[in-house]
Amino acid sequence: MKHSIEVTTKIGCSNVCEYCPQSTLIKRYRERIGHDKDTMMSLETFKKSISTMPTEIGLNFTGYVEPFLNPECTDMLIHAFDKGHELLLNTTLVGMTIEDWDRLRRHGVVFQHGVHVHLPSASYFEMIGAKVPQKYYTADDGKQYLELDDNYYEMLNHVVNNQMPYWTKFHCHGDLHPLLNDLKRYVELDVRNINSRAMNILLEKKEKVSDEINIRGKCPRAYQNVLLPDGSLGLCCQDYGLDDIMGNLVDNTWDEFVNSERVQDVRTNGADLCDYCEEGIDYVGDKENQWRRPQQIK
């Protein structure tokens, strides 16, 4: 795989994880892409966007939202696999059905770079797997947590017992939701950090990062742009504010895109957003008050 493109199948995520700047994304998509542009990627747009893309470019179904909130996500994955792209999937399982999972398995879809299942947290507000409308229960620690939906349990159990070839991994942010603690007996759990998304989640944006940690012009994510529902391409996974729209694969071929003056400049010199990227800095513990409001801190 030469490098990869992330796929954002829609704008707006019902998981509303408190560490994810969805309101910024929704607002800026309307401002930068247009109020009349699709917020749900069609299968036709996806096929057009990757039609001239070399197959050595990988496709990561992760992007800015849960990919399976788009009902055509399974069709997109199958099309990309049949075309010859290497795949990665990062999913909360929200929006996915057992039939989606089984259809991918029956078709022989291989995720060479893994399936990464994002599990609900006990530490931060998320609607991953939660009942709608919300219901809370009081756990043994005296704290209240969201109840999880029976359909989510069924979906998660199916995935655990019918994992994809290569590997399926599980992770959460902070502590695992207490109703899923038993899962640790069956799978290895990774705890991921909280990233400021180039300061997009901070209550107050800070000055540019220091020269010692500034990765401008040296970051491989300049080659990992984010495909948006209308075919436009955001700079990278940190660009929730869509500060840099790099091109559009509906309007242009892949060669026209990668050889454009803007893409060549950013891949060599970076972009202004890079000056605010805090990749590798974990906003937990004492740093939480920089992005969480007092009422959010348990």
Image: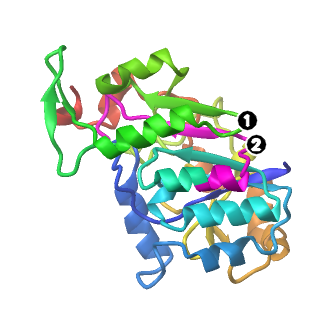
Residue occupying the point 39% across, 18% down? 182
Whether residue 128 can be seen here: no
**Looking at the rendering, in which quadrant would you find the C terminus?**
top left
| Disc 1 target residue | 166
Q: Where, by quadrant of the figure, is residue 44 drawn?
A: bottom right
Measured in 3D between alpha carbons, the distance from the residue under mark 1 to the one under mark 2, in whole angstroms, is 6 Å
Q: Where, by quadrant of the figure, is residue 121 drawn?
A: top left
The spot of residue 119 in percent (x, y) is 43, 34
Dot 1 surroundings within 10 Å: few (below 14), some, or many (20 or more)?
Answer: few
Q: Main secondary structure of the magenta part?
A: loop
The spot of residue 283 in percent (x, y) is 43, 29
Q: Are marks 1 and 2 in contact (CB under 8 Å)?
A: yes
Q: Where, by quadrant of the figure, is residue 250 drawn?
A: bottom right
Q: Is residue 234 left or right of residue 52?
A: left
Q: Which residues are magenta?
A: 103-126
Foreground pick, 205 / 159: 159
Foreground pick, 139 / 219: 139
Callout 1 amino acid: Tyr
User: Of tags 1 and 2, which is closer to the observer?
Assistant: 1
Residue occupying the point 57% across, 67% down? 228
Q: Is residue 15 above or below residue 84?
A: above
**Residue 45 belongs to the span the image colors magenta:** no
| Disc 2 target residue | 112
